């Protein structure tokens, strides 16, 4: 059966409605109490999760696998254009699984114009559900709220992976003839990551 423009419009409407229900369901989950984790600034100095809020009561933290993952770099590169807009609404930071010095040099190389910290050996990723039992870090994002008494709760989170809502590359490529085909993100070398497998970049 031939697909029509009306079919596409209807499917698009159904997709938007399903996504709205999905995010409403996330919002309806009970808030999750979170300890004030100690992370590391790129100079190696300690920084608390509470410090990342600045003067905001909301915070988004990107869980990044580190320099070795080209897929994670693709997502992080995309936030360069969004960071200033996001930070008008809430605080925003990337937490890498690399050592602080590696985070510093790689963030400078990529031109990441937002706060970057290291969660290496902190237990933060595991506590947030973004580390597998085998020790591999997973990519995603967590949303936090600082309550009036200073305590922190997580209000939502989502894994990152090809086709998600957090990277414009995938839906754009879906529009071209042949789609993604064999393309994979790179930053100077073939990916040493998972290639978008379900155990890594698909959460």
Image (cartoon, helix red, strand yellow):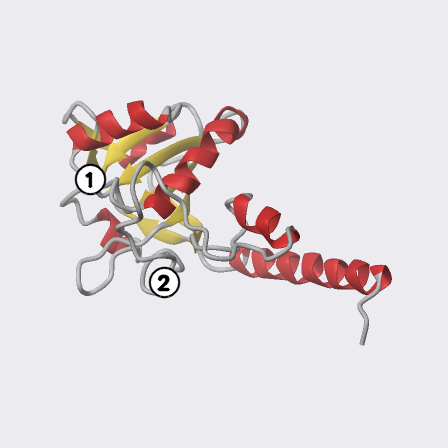
Give me the disc on residue 197.
2
Q: Secondary structure at mark 2?
A: loop
Q: How packed is label 2: few (under 14 Cα within 10 Å), some, or many (20 or more)?
A: few
Where residue 95 appears, as percent x and y from the top left, is 29, 39
Q: Quadrant of the C terminus?
A: bottom left
Where on the picture, by quarter, is residue 8? Answer: bottom right
- Earlier in the chain: of badge 1 and badge 2, it is 1
At 24% across and 62% down in the image, what residue appears?
Answer: 132
At 37% across and 56% down in the image, what residue appears?
Answer: 201
Q: Secondary structure at mark 1?
A: loop
Residue in front for this viewpoint, 17 or 30: 17
At 41% across and 23% down in the image, what residue appears?
Answer: 55
Q: Quadrant of the N terminus?
A: bottom right
Where residue 174 appears, as percent x and y from the top left, is 61, 54
Where on the picture, by quarter, is residue 122? Answer: top left
| Cα distance between the residues tagged 1 and 2 | 21 Å
- Disc 1 and disc 2 in contact, CB within 8 angstroms: no
Residue 161 is left or right of residue 5, and the answer is left
Residue 14 is left or right of residue 137, and the answer is right
Where residue 43 appears, as percent x and y from the top left, is 17, 23
Residue 35 is left or right of residue 20, and the answer is left
Badge count: 2
Any part of residue 105 in sight: yes
Where residue 86 appears, as percent x and y from the top left, is 52, 30
Give me the disc on residue 98.
1
| Nearest-to-viewer mark from 1 and 2 | 2
Where on the picture, by quarter, is residue 188? Answer: top left
Residue in front for this viewpoint, 130 or 64: 64
Q: How packed is label 1: few (under 14 Cα within 10 Å), some, or many (20 or more)?
A: many
């Amino acid at each position: 059966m031939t697909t029509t423009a009306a079919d596409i419009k209807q499917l698009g409407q159904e997709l938007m409605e399903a996504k709205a229900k999905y995010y409403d369901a996330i919002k309806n989950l009970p808030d999750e109490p979170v300890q004030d984790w100690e992370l590391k600034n790129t100079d190696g100095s300690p920084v608390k999760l509470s410090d990342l809020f600045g003067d905001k009561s909301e915070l988004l933290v990107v869980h990044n696998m580190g320099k070795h993952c080209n897929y994670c770099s693709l997502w992080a590169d995309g936030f360069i254009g969004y960071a200033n807009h996001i930070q008008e609404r809430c605080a925003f930071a990337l937490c890498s699984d690399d050592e602080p010095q590696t985070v510093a040099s790689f963030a400078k190389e990529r031109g990441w114009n937002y706060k970057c910290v290291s969660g290496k050996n902190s237990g933060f990723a595991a506590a947030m559900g973004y580390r597998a039992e085998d020790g591999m870090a997973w990519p995603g994002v967590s949303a936090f709220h600082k309550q009036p008494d200073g305590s922190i709760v997580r209000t939502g989170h989502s894994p990152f992976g090809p086709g998600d809502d957090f990277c414009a590359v995938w839906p754009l490529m879906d529009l071209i003839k042949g789609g993604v085909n064999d393309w994979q993100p790179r930053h100077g070398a073939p990916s040493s990551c998972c290639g978008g497998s379900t155990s890594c970049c698909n959460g």
